[in-house]
Amino acid sequence: MREDGFTYLELIIATILLAVLAAAIVPVAAVGSKRAKEAELRASLRTMRTAIDEYKRAVDMGVIGGTDLELGSEGYPEELKVLVEGVSQVGTPGKKLKFLRRIPIDPMTNSAEWGTRSYQDEPDASMWGGQNVYDVFTKSTATALDGSKYSDW
C-alpha cells in the first residue's frame, strides 16, 4: 500500500530551500528601499531649489518688492517658510504669491527640518549664515548607495 504525501526529509529540504531564497531577497529589498528614499530626497531637493529659483526670478522681474524684501537678501527668501506662506505681489494688494504648498519631509531624517545656506555662505558650509535661503540640503550624515554623503547632494 502506498500513501501519498511528503516524507519528513522532503519537508526539511523544502524548508531549507525557502530559507535560502528568503535570505537572498532581504538585501535586495533593503537596497530597493534605500534607492526609493534617495529618489524621494532628490525630488524634494529639486522641488525646493526650483521654488527658491522662482522666488529669485520674481524678485528680479519686480513682481515681489517693497516691505517683503529684506536689505542684503540678494533677492532670496529669508526662510523656507516664506515660500509656503507667500509674499505680496507688486500692484495687487491682498494677493499673495506662493511658491510651495508645504515644505517637503526629508525622507532621510523624517522631518521637515532642512539644512540651509545663504548666498553669503561658502558653497560647502554646514551652518546657515542667517541672511537668506540660497540652497537647501539634508541634515542626514548617512552615505548614499553611490558612496557620496546625502548632505552633499
Image (tube, helix red, strand yellow):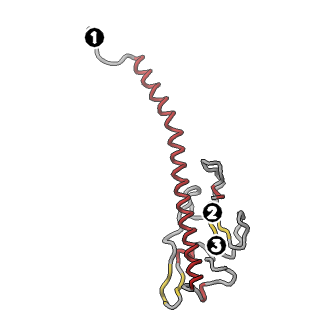
In the depicted structure, whether residue 90 falls above or below residue 110: below
Q: Position of residue 79 (x, y in %)?
A: 61, 74
Check disc 3 and report its element: helix, strand or loop. loop
Alpha-carbon span between mark 1 and mark 3: 79 Å
Residue type at the position of mark 1: Arg
Q: Position of residue 145 (x, y in %)?
A: 60, 47
Which residue is outermost to the top?
1
Mark 2 neighbour class, 10 Å CA radius: few under 14, some 14 to 19, many 20 or more: many
- Mark carried by residue 2: 1
In the depicted structure, whether residue 24 falls above or below residue 108: above
Per the image, the residue denoted by label 2 is 137
N-terminal of the pair, mark 1 or mark 3, is 1
Image quadrant where one finds the C terminus = bottom right
Image quadrant where one finds the N terminus = top left
Foreground pick, 71 / 111 = 71
Residue type at the position of mark 3: Val
In the rendered image, which quarter is residue 118 located in?
bottom right
- Residue appearing at x 66%, y 79% in the figure: 74
Per the image, the residue denoted by label 3 is 133
Check disc 1 and report its element: helix, strand or loop. loop
Foreground pick, 51 / 141 = 51
Which residue is outermost to the front?
61
> On the picture, is 122 further left or further right than 51?
right
Check disc 2 and report its element: helix, strand or loop. strand
